[in-house]
Image (spheres, helix red, strand yellow):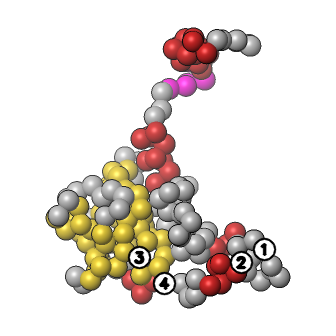
Amino acid sequence: MEIYLEASEGPRMWELLMEVGREYGLIPCGLGARDTLRLEASMPLYGHEMDDGISPEEAGLGFFVKMGKEDFIGKKALMEKGPLTRKRVGLRVTGRGIVRERQAVYAGGQLIGMTTSGTHCPYLGYPAAMALVDVACKEPGTAVEVDVRGRRVAAEIVALPFYKRG
């Protein structure tokens, strides 16, 4: 089925998509739903878990970068960063509260990192977040607290991904 619409017919596009997709079980899904699924699968998003200031190794994507290669664009910059000082981890929120991005993470009262993404995960049944934390504190089971609008919310570091196909 081919359909041609003028730009001014944008609202009609929605109706056509919903009509054509009905037999395939198409349902509306917004960015919030996409972001929840992304978080449950621990998929990094540019501007959150990775950007120009977060190395692939810190983001948990080091397996894509072959440092043993003779040379590649960006190799020098990665080498100049020096030893790994922080790592992306998962946080299972055990206290009452929803963790969001850019919230301070503490262990033993010391600031150890910042969250990069977070929300309540309906499929998992609990609030979860990802954070960049000091490598000394990255081990699963480490108790942490996240500053949520001036209140410390208990969480623990867990292995990623949160969701694993069974």
SS class, disc 2? helix
Q: Is residue 5 visible?
A: yes
Q: Which residue is mark 4?
A: 85
SS class, disc 4? loop
Q: Is residue 41 visible?
A: no
Q: Residue at x 58, y 83 (%)?
A: 81
Q: Residue at x 70, y 12 (%)?
A: 3
Q: Amino acid at mark 3?
A: Val
Kindly identify which numbered label has been placed on residue 75: 2
Q: Earlier in the sequence, mark 4 or mark 2?
A: 2
Which one is in front, 87 or 24?
Answer: 87
Circles 2 and 1: CB distance less than 8 Å?
Answer: yes
Disc number lying in front (4 or 2): 2
SS class, disc 1? loop
Q: Earlier in the sequence, mark 3 or mark 2?
A: 2
- Please provide percent x and percent y for residue 117: 41, 58
Q: CA distance from mark 3 to mark 2?
A: 23 Å
SS class, disc 3? strand
- Please provide percent x and percent y for residue 153: 22, 66
Residue 23 among magenta residues: yes
- Say few, some or many: other residues with alpha carbon within 10 Å of mark 2 (under 14 / 14 to 19 / 20 or more): some
Q: Earlier in the sequence, mark 3 or mark 4?
A: 4
Q: Quadrant of residue 109?
A: bottom left
Q: Amino acid at mark 4?
A: Thr
Q: Quadrant of residue 115?
A: bottom left
- Please provide percent x and percent y for residue 51: 54, 63
Q: Is residue 12 left or right of residue 66?
A: left
Q: Which residue is mark 3?
A: 133
Q: Amino acid at mark 2?
A: Lys
